[in-house]
Amino acid sequence: MPVDFAGAAVGTAFGELFSVVENVLQTVRAFGPQLKKINNTLSKIDPIIKDWDEYNRRLDRSLTDMRPIKALLNKGKNLVEKCSRINPLNVFQKYMHSKKLTKFDAEVLREFQIYIPLLNARNNSEILWEVKEMRMEFKELIRFGQVSGGALQSGLGASGNLAVPEAPDFIVGLEVEASLRKLKGRLLEEGVSVIVVTAPGGCGKTTLLTKLCHDMDIEGKFNNNIMFVPVSKKPNLIDIIRKMIQHKGFKVPVIETEDHAVHYLQRLLIIIGQNPVLLVLDDVWTNSHSIIEKFVFKEIKHYKIVVTSRYEFPAYRPVHHLNPLTHGEALELFRQSVTVDDSSMDAPDDELLEQIVKRCKGLPLALTVIAKSLRGKDRSFWETKLLDWSCSGLDSDILDCLRKSLDDLDGNPSIKERFMDLGLFPEDRKIPATVLIDMWVELYKLDFDGVHAIADLNKLVYRNLADLVVTRRDSSEDEDKCYSSHYAMQHDLLRELAIVECNQQGEVEKRERLILDLTGNNFPDWWSEQKQLTLGARLVSISTDGTFSTPWPNLELPEAEALVLNFETNIQTKTYALPKFIEKADKLKALIITNYSFFPAELGNFHVVGSNLRRIRLERITVPFLSMGKLRLHSLRKISFFMCDISQASTSDDTKISDAMPNLVELHIDYCNDLMTLPDGICEIKPLRKLSITNCHNFSELPEQIGQSASLEVVRLNSCTNLSQLPDSIGTLEKLISLNISDCLSLSTLPNQIGQLVSLKRMNMKGCLRLSELPRSIVKLRNLRKVVCDKGKEVLWEPLKSSLNALNIIASKEEEANLDWLRD
C-alpha cells in the first residue's frame, strides 16, 4: 500500500482557493491589490499543481509529503473568505488583514519557488524527478525569500550579501561612457559567457561595474539574479559559493571540498538559471586566475560572468581595457571633486591646477582623494603640495602621490591615524563601524558612545579615503548611538597605502601598528627566528587563513592596547586557538576577534583573555555565554556578539555572569539565533545602561528580573520575531529613555506597567503586526517625544497628543510584509 501523503487532495484544495479568490476579487474592493497578487501567484503555480496530480495518479504515490502544502492552501482559503467580513471603514482591521494576505502570498511563493523556474524547461516527469533530486541534495537549503535592505542586510554584509553596491552619482569620461555601452551590449546579446575588464588599480573598474549593474536594461534582464562577488587576493571558493547560496535565499549546507562546492554551485544555477544570471567576480588577482574556471558552466544558457582585474587572463576573451582618464576628463573630475556645495571654486589658476592633475596620471581614485585634500585651501597650500611632490619625483609611484594627500588634513593629524587604522582589516571586507568605535574610543580617549569616532569616520569618507555603507536606514540607531548598520570599506589601493605608511614607521620592534597577514604556517623571519620577541606596537592585527595550524610562536606585546584577530577555519577543525601571548598583554583594552569562515568556530584558550580588557567583540564564535562567568573581566565595559553561538552553557552557581563582568555598561547580541533567553545574572549587573538584542529569531522572553537593571537607558529588541511579551517588571526601569521593539512579529500586547517608564522619550514599534491595542497606562508617558509605527496604527497614539503637545508620531508607509530576514 502506498503511503498517503494527501497528494491528490492538494489539487482539490488549490481549486477551491483559486475559485474563492476570483469570486471575492469581484465582490470586495477593499483588498483588491492583495487579492490580485495572490491570483497572479496562483496562476503561476496552476501548471505545477496539475503536473503533480497527473504524476501522482500515474505512479499511485506522491512525490513528497503534500500535507503542509494542503494546510497552507486551506489557510489561504480561510483568509480570503474572511475578506467579506472585514469592515472596510475599520482602518486597523483592514490594515491587519492586508498584512496577512500579503504574508500568505509570500509563503506560497516561498513554497513553490524551486519549481517555477523549471516550468517549460523539460517534460513533466523530468521536472518532477529533477526537483526531487535537488530537494534531497539541498535538504538544508530552505527558501526564505530574497534579501533586500532590511534587517538581515547587516549580517549579510559580512557573510552572504552579494548585492550590487550603490552606483556613483556621476561618472566622468567618454572612455567610461563608451565602456558602459560596449559592456552593456555584450551582456544583452546571446553568447559570450566570460568578459574580463582590466585596468590598473584606481582606474574605476568596480565603479564601472556598479554603474553597469544598475543600468535599467541590465536590471530588467537579470532582475534579482545579479551577484557581485569581491574575490581579492586570497579567495576562498567554498565561502564564495556559500555566500551565493545564502544570497539566493537558501540555507547553507555543509560543504567540505572545492569539488563539493562546485557541485552545489551547479545545482544552484540549474534552479535559478532558467532566468538570466549575471555574476561579477570583482578584483581577481593573477595568482587566483584558476578560480574563474570554477564558475563557468556553458550549459547554463543565459549565464554571464564579468571579471575585473589588474591583469589579463589569456584563457578568457573578450578582454575590455579600461584606460585612465584623458587630461581633459581628469580636469573635469578634479574640478567636481574639489568644489564645495556646487559653488564656484575659488581655486588657483589653471596652470597650477593642471600641474597637480597631471601628477594623478588620470586615475579617478587619486584625483578624488587629492582634490578633497586640497578642497578649501589657499594658493600657497596648493603650491607647497606641488613643490613637495615635484621634489620627491612622485611621477613614478601613484602611492606616493596619494600619500602626500594625507599630510596635514585640516591641520589634524589624527585623521591620518584613523586612515592607517583601517589597514588593520582584511582586503575587501566591510568593517563594522562599531569595531572602529571600540578601537578608537579606547585608543584615542573619545566619548564612550563613539559619536566622535563616527565623526572621524565621516571625515575619511568626505575625503574619499573610505566609503561608508549603511545597510539599513534607521534614525533610532543614530539616536541610540548604536550604529550597527554602518560599515566602512576601503579601496584596496588605499589599504595598500595605509599598510605602507604603517611599515615606514621604522623597525618592526618600534612600529606603532603591526599588521601581519599570514598564509598557512609561514611566519615572518623576524618572528619565527626569535624565541622571545618584544614589540612596541599599540595596535596589532594578525590575519590567518584556513590552512593555519602551527602553534603560535612567542611574542610580547607590553604596549598593545588594541588587538584585531582575523581568521578562517577549515572544515575539519572548526576551532581557533587564541595566542597565549594575549595573557601577558597587560595594557590591552580592545579585543576584536572575527571569524571569516561561514560557520561559527570554537575558541580555544579563551581563558587567556586579560582582566584589563574594556571592550570585546566576537563574530561567528562559539562561546557559551554562561561559561564566560568563569572569567574575571572586571574592567569590561562593552561586549558584542555577532552571529555567535552563545546559549549552550552550564547553569551552575559558580558561573555567574554578573561576577565575571560586574562593570558592564553595554551588551550587544546580534544574529545569535540559538539565544532563547538571557541568563538571570545579566540583570544583576548594576551599571548596565544599554541592552541590544537584535535579529535573534529564537529569542522568546526577557527575564522577569530585568526590572533589577535600574541603570538601563536603551533597550533594543528589534527583529526578535519570537518575542511574545515584555515582562511586567520593565515598568520599574525609571531611567529608560529609548525602547525599540520594531519587527517583533509575535508581540501582541504591552504590559500595563509600561506607563511607569517616566523617562521614556522614544519608542519604535514599526512592524509589530499583532500589536493592535495599547494599555491605558500609556497616557502616563509624559516625557514621550517620538513614536515610530506603521501607517494605520497612528490612531492608537492620537489620544496622547492632547496631553503631549511635543509628541511626534511617525507613521511609515504601508509596505508589503517583509519577512525576508527570517531564518531558522
Image (tube, rainbow, N blue to C red):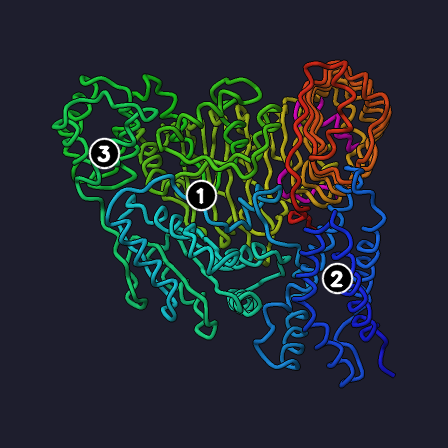
Q: Where residue 341 sits in the image (x, y, percent)? A: 35, 24
Q: Where residue 15 sits in the image (x, y, percent)? A: 78, 69
Tell me which segment is drawn in magenta: 641-666
- The residue singled out by tag 3 in the image is 401
**Closer to the observer: label 1 or label 2?**
2
Q: Along the line of sight, which residue is nearer the eye, 589 or 239?
A: 239
Magenta span dominant secondary structure: loop
Q: Earlier in the sequence, mark 3 or mark 2?
A: 2
**Closer to the observer: label 3 or label 2?**
2
- The residue singled out by tag 2 in the image is 22
Vertical placement of residue 517 versus 268, above or below: above
Left or right of residue 305: residue 398: left
Q: Quadrant of residue 189?
A: bottom left
Left or right of residue 89: residue 190: left
**Callout 1: SS:** loop
- The residue singled out by tag 1 in the image is 166
Return the mark for residue 504: none
Q: Is residue 687 visible?
A: no
Q: Earlier in the sequence, mark 1 or mark 2?
A: 2
Q: How many marks?
A: 3
Q: Where residue 199 sits in the image (x, y, percent)? A: 27, 51
Residue lying at 22% horizontally and 38% vertically, measured from the top left = 330
642 within the magenta span? yes
**Closer to the observer: label 1 or label 3?**
1
Q: Amino acid at mark 1?
A: Glu
Residue lying at 30% horizontally and 23% vertically, measured from the top left = 343
Vertical placement of residue 450 versus 58, above or below: above
Query: Could you tell me how far apart the alpha carbons at marks 1 and 2 are, in whole angstroms?
Result: 41 Å
> Would you call the spot at circle 1 few (<14 residues within 10 Å), some (14-19), or many (20 or more)?
few
Q: Quadrant of residue 671?
A: top right
649 within the magenta span? yes
